[in-house]
C-alpha cells in the first residue's frame, strides 16, 4: 500500500477520491476481519469461552476478554465458571478503561455473590473506577487542569465504596490502599468547598461563602484546606461586621497556624480573598473581562 501511494506523485481529484474509497474499504475490511477473529467460536463450550478469556487477559487484550466473558455469562449463567467469569469481567472492563461498565459489573457481582471471599475486590475496583471517573483523563495528563473546581460527585461515591470495603472487610488486602485514597478524597472534597467559597466571594455572596468555609472546618478538620477556610471565614465576618464570629475564627487560626499565611511578619491578620470589585460601567458590561 505504501509503494502504491509513492507512485502517485500528482493525483487528480478523481484519483484521490478513488484512493480514499479504496483505503476506506480496506479499513472496513480490516475491522471486519479483526472483529471476526476476536469473536468467540460459535457454539463454544463454557470451558472454551473461559480459556479464551484467560488467554486474552494474559495477552492484555481486554476487549477480546470482555467479549468472551460476556458470552460465557449469557450462555452459562449458572455454570462452573460463572462466578469467576463475573469477577474477571470486572477486571477486564476496568483494564479496558470501560470504567462505567466495570462499576456495573462490580455492582452485579456484589449483588449476586455477597458472601464470596472475593467480594472485597469488587468493592475495591468499584471505588477505584469511581475515583478515576471523577479525576478524568485530562487532569491525569495535564497538570494545568484544576480538579478542585470540578464537582466531585464520583469522588463522593468512591469514598462510600472504600468506606464500605473497610467497614465490612477491615483485614482485606485492599483496605490499606482504600484508607489512603479516602484521606486523599477528603482533602479533595475540602478543597472543592474552599473553591466554592472563593467563587461566592467573587459574586459578593458573603453569607454563602462563610457557610461553605464553615462546612470545611466542621466536616474536614484534619485536611490542609482548613487554613484557607478559616481565613475566608475571618475575612467574610469582618467584612459583614460580625466581630464576635471573626474573633472566634481568628483565635482558632492563630492557635493552629501561628506562623501560617494568614499572618504577616508582624503577626497581624493578612486578608487575601476579599478584594474591592471594580464596579465601573465597563466592568459590568464586560463581566470584568477588561478589569
Image: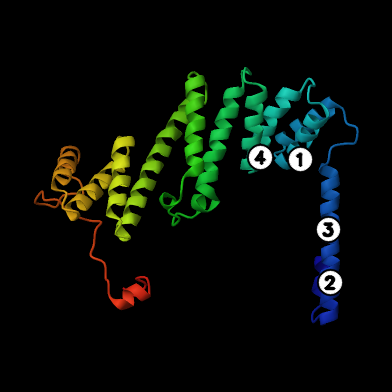
**Residue that protrudes farthest toward the right in the picture:** 43
Percent x, y of residue 33: 86, 50
- Mark 2 falls on what kind of element? helix
Picture coordinates of residue 179, whole percent (x, y): 44, 29
For marks 3 and 1, give the CA distance. Answer: 19 Å
Residue 94: numbered disc: none
Q: Secondary structure at mark 4?
A: helix
222 sits to left or right of 97 = left
Q: Nearer the viewer, mark 3 or mark 2?
A: 3
Quickly name the residue at label 4.
Answer: 101
Q: Label 1, on which residue?
A: 64
Q: Secondary structure at mark 1?
A: helix
Looking at the picture, tell me which residue is in the foreground, 162 or 41: 162
Which label's residue is closer to the chain start, 1 or 4? 1
Instruction: Measure the C-alpha gap from mark 3 to mark 2.
Output: 14 Å
In the image: residue 111, left or right of residue 223: right
Q: Which residue is mark 3?
A: 28
Mark 3 vs 2, N-terminal side: 2
Q: CA distance from mark 1 to mark 4?
A: 15 Å
Residue 19 numbered mark, or none = 2
What is the CA distance from the residue labelled 4 to the residue labelled 2?
Answer: 38 Å
- Write the residue at 62% across / 22% down: 118
Amino acid at each position: 500500500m505504501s509503494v502504491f501511494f509513492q507512485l502517485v506523485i500528482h493525483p487528480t481529484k478523481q484519483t484521490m477520491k478513488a484512493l480514499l474509497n479504496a483505503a476506506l474499504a480496506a479499513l472496513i475490511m480490516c475491522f471486519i476481519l479483526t472483529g471476526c477473529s476476536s469473536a468467540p467460536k460459535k457454539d463454544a463450550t463454557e470451558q472454551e469461552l473461559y480459556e479464551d478469556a484467560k488467554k486474552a487477559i494474559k495477552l492484555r487484550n481486554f476487549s477480546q476478554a470482555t467479549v468472551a466473558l460476556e458470552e460465557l455469562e449469557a450462555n452459562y449463567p449458572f455454570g462452573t465458571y460463572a462466578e469467576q467469569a463475573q469477577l474477571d469481567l470486572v477486571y477486564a472492563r476496568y483494564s479496558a478503561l470501560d470504567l462505567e461498565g466495570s462499576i456495573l459489573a462490580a455492582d452485579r457481582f456484589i449483588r449476586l455473590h455477597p458472601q464470596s471471599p472475593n467480594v472485597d475486590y469488587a468493592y475495591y475496583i468499584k471505588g477505584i473506577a469511581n475515583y478515576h471517573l471523577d479525576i478524568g483523563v485530562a487532569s491525569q495528563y495535564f497538570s494545568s487542569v484544576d480538579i478542585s473546581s470540578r464537582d466531585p460527585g464520583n469522588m463522593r461515591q468512591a469514598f462510600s465504596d472504600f468506606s464500605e470495603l473497610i467497614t465490612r472487610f477491615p483485614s482485606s488486602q485492599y483496605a490499606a490502599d482504600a484508607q489512603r485514597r479516602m484521606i486523599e478524597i477528603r482533602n479533595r472534597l475540602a478543597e472543592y468547598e474552599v473553591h466554592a467559597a472563593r467563587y461566592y466571594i467573587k459574586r459578593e455572596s458573603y453569607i454563602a461563602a462563610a457557610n461553605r468555609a464553615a462546612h470545611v472546618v466542621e466536616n474536614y478538620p484534619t485536611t490542609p484546606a482548613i487554613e484557607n477556610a478559616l481565613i475566608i471565614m475571618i475575612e467574610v465576618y469582618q467584612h459583614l461586621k460580625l466581630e464576635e464570629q471573626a474573633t472566634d475564627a481568628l483565635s482558632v487560626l492563630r492557635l493552629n497556624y501561628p506562623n501560617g499565611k494568614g499572618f504577616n511578619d508582624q503577626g497581624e491578620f493578612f486578608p487575601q480573598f476579599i478584594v474591592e470589585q471594580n464596579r465601573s460601567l465597563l466592568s459590568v458590561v464586560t463581566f470584568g473581562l477588561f478589569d
